[in-house]
Amino acid sequence: METSGVSNPVTAVLLNFRGYDTLLEMAVLLVALLGVWSLGSAAVYRRSNPEPVLLSLVGVLVPMLLLMAGYLLWVGADAPGGAFQAGSVLAAAGILMLLACKRPPVQLLGWSLRLVLVLGLGAFIAVGVSLLSASGMFLQYPPGLAGALILFIEAAATLSIGVTLAALFLGGRLDPDA
């Protein structure tokens, strides 16, 4: 555990000792979304007046879910939590906003959406390739940098997982003109 860079045994196993599994899980999520997108565009559902109870619930829950996602990401190094849990909570916040017909503060369409979707997998691969060129081993973190590299990968993966799961909820490709 001392060489893993984290004190949580689950995070140590998933990102340090069995990093290939987590890397492939990120790839599977992305491929699943591409499969859903290949079926066509998402149905546009616009409600002119969402229910007031839903709007007030979204106003209360979304900030709490964002804080919870940040907490789960941060605590993942020392206790149960991490990128997949934080990404799921982030996706729940996004789905609540979609159900209430509220726009997120950042418009994710086109290239910006694609960039966020591949961010987690790209960060994982970039760290692995840089470690391969530095030490000759893919995803073998040096003990002094392991914690920081794992946190970097998990932060990128959290955003990617959250947006991917919310996009999967929509059930189709997002058209920028819709």
Image (tube, grey):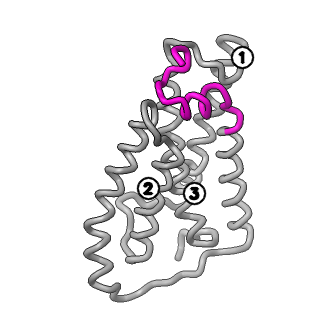
Above-or-below relation of 77 to 28:
above
Percent position (x, y) of residue 134? Answer: 65, 12
How far apart marks 2 and 3 lie (CA) works out to 10 Å
Q: Residue furthest bottom?
A: 48
Mark 1: which secondary structure? loop
Q: Is residue 15 magenta?
A: yes
Q: Residues within 10 Å of mark 2 (few under 14, many from 20)?
A: many
Disc 1 marks which amino acid?
A: Met
Q: Is residue 164 magenta?
A: no
Q: Residue 26: name its quadrant.
A: top right
Percent position (x, y) of residue 89? Answer: 44, 56
Tell me if 60 is positioned left or right of 127 in this view: left
Mark in front: 2 vs 3: 2
Percent position (x, y) of residue 169? Answer: 56, 69
Tell me if 111 is positioned left or right of 151 in this view: right
Mark 2: which secondary structure? helix
Q: Which mark is residue 137?
A: 1
Residue shown at 61%/26% (left/top)?
16
To which residue does mark 2 refer?
90
Q: What span is in magenta?
A: 1-21
Percent position (x, y) of residue 147? Answer: 48, 23
- Discs 1, 3 touching: Cβ within 8 Å: no
To which residue does mark 3 refer?
164
Q: Earlier in the sequence, mark 2 or mark 3?
A: 2
Q: Residues within 10 Å of mark 3 (few under 14, many from 20)?
A: many
